[in-house]
Structures are given as structure tokens and as C-alpha cells.
Image (spheres, rainbow, N blue to C red):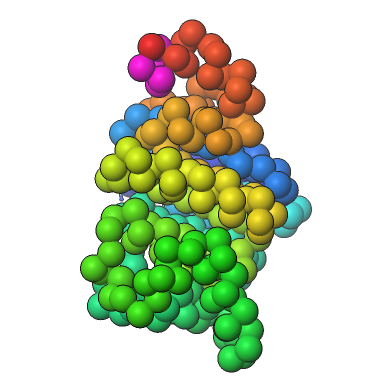
Amino acid sequence: MLKVNGIDVYYGKVQALFDVSIEVGDREIVSIIGANGAGKTTLMKSIMGINKPKNGTIEYNGQVISGLPPHKVVSKKIVYIPEGREIFPNMTVQENLEMGAYSVKLSKAEMERHLEEQYEIFPRLKERAKQKAGSMSGGEQQMLAIARGLMSDPELLMLDEPSLGLAPVIVDDMFDVIVRVNKVRNIPIAIVEQNAFMAMSISDRTYVLEVGNLVTHGESKTLMDSDEIKKAYLGG
Ligand code: ATP
């Protein structure tokens, strides 16, 4: 389980997160919603060790991980898929997936098994295994970014704006895939999203960030019924 305990994060003198606490339980999908600049990415980067909290701690499975450099956080099997799907456009889909397992050094047989696992969850990628990744649609590239992250067998997956820039019909597919990954792989997933409706629809619990402050959190179903949340985040 991931526990963020009251972190304050600064960029120089400017404070971006104020006493933020969140938890992600073992099997949960948790969404973190908020407007542009609310601090969602900052929170993810803090968990990954890219930003160092000035106060507060971050624990993973009972160990304090705040203060660790990013590669040590990754070695705890926490995988972060940043926004903007940074795939390798000139490599094929399969080569991109193989790169995802680079840090875990798989045998040939294990590599095959890992690839097959991804192709089962993402059949579209199997059809396109030999295609240059950069020539795929935005949605397919986003799926590839997630599948590549799964190649290293994460125990916690963190997705930053997986629906960013995708057409509405593709957004539905994307969130279906996230639910499937959670079910098939049995891993917790934390999603940062501006698409509050979709993120809340598929998550167990939601945290709401406003200008660096956590303003409310709770079961997604309950929050979706709240008038304030409806007005502020769900278009009335
Ligand atoms: P978006 O949805 O637009 O990505 P966000 O909720 O992820 O927004 P952050 O990217 O975490 O928000 O930004 C939170 C605040 O911190 C913003 O005011 C932003 O300008 C500031 N910020 C983010 N990164 C830096 C940086 N490297 N240096 C200085 N300020 C930063």
C-alpha cells in the first residue's frame, strides 16, 4: 500500500503542494482529479522521487520511500506513465515493449511470456507488433505506453492523464483497458485526470486537488452524487 503523509512540495520558493495526504490500497483504482495546475503531476513526481517533499513522508509497503532517487523508487516496482506518451516513435511496437523490460533483464522465454501477456490485454498492439510506433493513432500510442510500463511487472501503476488528447470514443476504450489491467494483473492503479467523469466512473476512490490543496476525498460513487463536485467537475 502507498501512503503519502502530509507532503509539502516546492518549486524554488513557490509551494505547489500543501500538506497533501493520499493512500492507494492493494487492489484499488484511485483517481486524483483537479484543474490545470492543481498539482496532480507534482504529486506523482513526488511519489516517484523526482520532486522531494520539504515536509511529510511517502511510504510504500511500510517503508519510507521519500528521499529515494527515482531509480530506487522504480526498483520497488512502482511504474509511472507520464502524460504525453513518451514512446519511441521510430521503433516498432514490439521493440518498444521490449524496452519496457530493459531494467528487469528478462530471459528470452520470460520476454516472450511478458509480451504475450501484454498482447492479451491489448490485442490491437499484437496486430501492430511490427508497425513503427510513431505511425499509430494517439489512442494506440497511449495503450503502448501503458503496455510498455507493464512489461517490468509493476506492483503499483501510476498513470498521468491517460486520456489527454484522445477522441471521446477512444477515451472510453482507454478507461476500459485501465479497468482490465487492474482486474487481470491484480495491481493497484492511481490515475491523475482532468477528465473527472471518466476517472471517477472507473475508480473506487477519488481525491480532489485545488491549487495544491486536497479539498475532499471519498468513494467515487458518493462524490459523483455530491452537488459541489457535480458543479465544479462534472459539468453540472
Ligand atoms: P496539468 O493538469 O495542467 O498537468 P497539474 O495538476 O498536473 O496540471 P502540476 O503540473 O503539478 O499541475 O503543477 C502545479 C503547479 O506547480 C503549477 O502552478 C505549475 O506551474 C507549477 N510547476 C510545475 N512544475 C514546475 C517546475 N518544474 N518549476 C516551477 N513550477 C512548476
Q: Say whether residue 21 is visible.
A: no
Q: Nearer the viewer, residue 216 or 91?
A: 91
Give the percent coordinates (x, y) of residue 231.
40, 12
**Residue drawn at (56%, 19%), measured in percent from left and top?**
223
Magenta-colored stretch includes residue 234: yes
How far across and how far down the image is residue 227, in percent? 49, 8
Hey, which quadrant is residue 15 in on the image? top left
* Residue under the image location 60 percent in, 22 percent down: 221
Compared to residue 151, the image places residue 178 above or below, namely above
Magenta range is: 231-235
Asked if the stretch drawn in magenta spans residue 80, the answer is: no
Query: In this rendering, is residue 217 above or below 115?
Result: above
Residue 120 in view of the camera: yes
Picture quadrant where residue 140 is located: bottom left
- Nearer the observer, 56 or 164: 164
| Figure quadrant of the C terminus | top left
Q: Could you tell me which residue is drawn at 48 percent across and 43 percent down?
A: 175
- Left or right: where 164 falls relative to 67: left
Instruction: Give residue 43's position: percent from left, percent from top.
Output: 47, 44
